Image (cartoon, grey):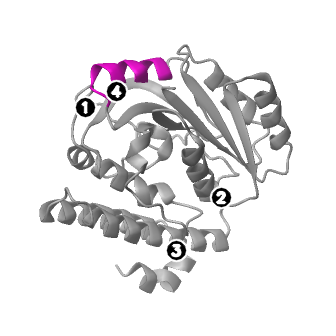
Amino acid sequence: MMFSVIVPCFNSKDYVRNCIDSILAQDYPSFEIILIDDGSTDGTSEILDDYANKYLRVRVYHFENAGVSYSRRRGITLATGNYLIFVDSYDTINPNLLRELSLAVAQHNLPDIIRYQANLVGDAKHKDHQRYNFGSNLNISQTGLDVLRQWSIPGKKYAVYWLFAFKRSVFANVLFTVDLRCYEDVALIPVLIAASKNVLTIRYVGYNYTCNNLNSLTNKRSLDAERQRAFDFIYAYKYAIENFSKLDNVSALDIAFFYEDYTNRLRGKYDSLPEELKDELADAFQL
């Protein structure tokens, strides 16, 4: 099995059919779909069971609600593919993604990580619609440390699971943080990349990300939600800094670069807080 497509699902009945259908529509045959139901209560569970009953390549697993981070970890454990792809249940992938990835795998000696491009659906007009995309050094194998330096551009983002195909072995030597319901990708993605020897970026626009999904933890606007997200971001920042520094292949200069980059991201998170939270959380951010 070449690819495992892992879909964490929670109360997404109005979107999840489009998501799964987009995966089933791939024009490359060697893949499985792993649906992780995170305690849905809105009818999503029944939809997932229906797909699993109709398609042999679809497997569904039901769990009590624990958050998307746990769902991804469960998917990794259950996957059998050589490469893992993560698709949020509100999003879709384009029909040639797996074929384009298979070509990249064959042509570039089994890269550890392959980055593709994304289309942002319903993005706010004032935002940079290319903030998740990177158009330089395409189809060139590089080390993870080299690409991190290139991708660490103010205003640009890369620390999201849905932007990459990961060789399954990439996860073997990196411990998962267990205390986050939000920003696990901020904690782990740079460490996974930095530990990799062979990283590739391709031109293909393979992912359609639904912006402003109101069910997403990162989009809930209450002060309590903002406060919890702030603490999660601080935890993710500390985890990333600590575990990046422990990697065998990083130098003192690499650590200094990463510390500066992630401290700037932490400062940006603080600056984005509602004014009523800034005084309350100033000491926690330690900026």
Q: Amino acid at mark 4?
A: Ile
Q: Which residue is mark 4?
A: 202
Describe residue 114's horizontal placement relative to residue 21 as left or right.
left
Describe residue 72's horizontal placement relative to residue 213 as left or right.
left
- Mark 3 vs mark 1, CA separation in Å: 34 Å
- Mark 1 vs mark 4, CA separation in Å: 10 Å
**Residue positioned 14% across, 65% down in the render:** 252
Q: Residue furthest top?
A: 27
- Mark 1 vs mark 2, CA separation in Å: 35 Å
The label number, if any, that marks residue 136 in the structure image: 1
**Mark 4 falls on what kind of element?**
strand
Q: Nearer the viewer, residue 107 or 94?
A: 107
Q: Which residue is mark 2?
A: 67
- Mark 4 vs mark 2, CA separation in Å: 30 Å
Residue 272, relative to residue 127: is it above or below? below
Nearer the observer, disc 1 or disc 4? 4
**Residue positioned 60% across, 63% down in the render:** 181
- Mark 2 vs mark 3, CA separation in Å: 16 Å
Q: Amino acid at mark 1?
A: Ser
Q: In the rendered structure, which segment of residues is drawn in magenta?
A: 98-110
The answer to whether mark 2 and mark 3 are in CB contact below 8 A is no
Residue 184 visible at all? yes
Which SS does the magenta portion mostly show? Answer: helix
Q: Position of residue 213 (x, y in %)?
A: 66, 46
The label number, if any, that marks residue 231 in the structure image: 3
How crowded pointer 4 is (Cα within 10 Å; few <14, some 14-19, many 20+) is rated as many
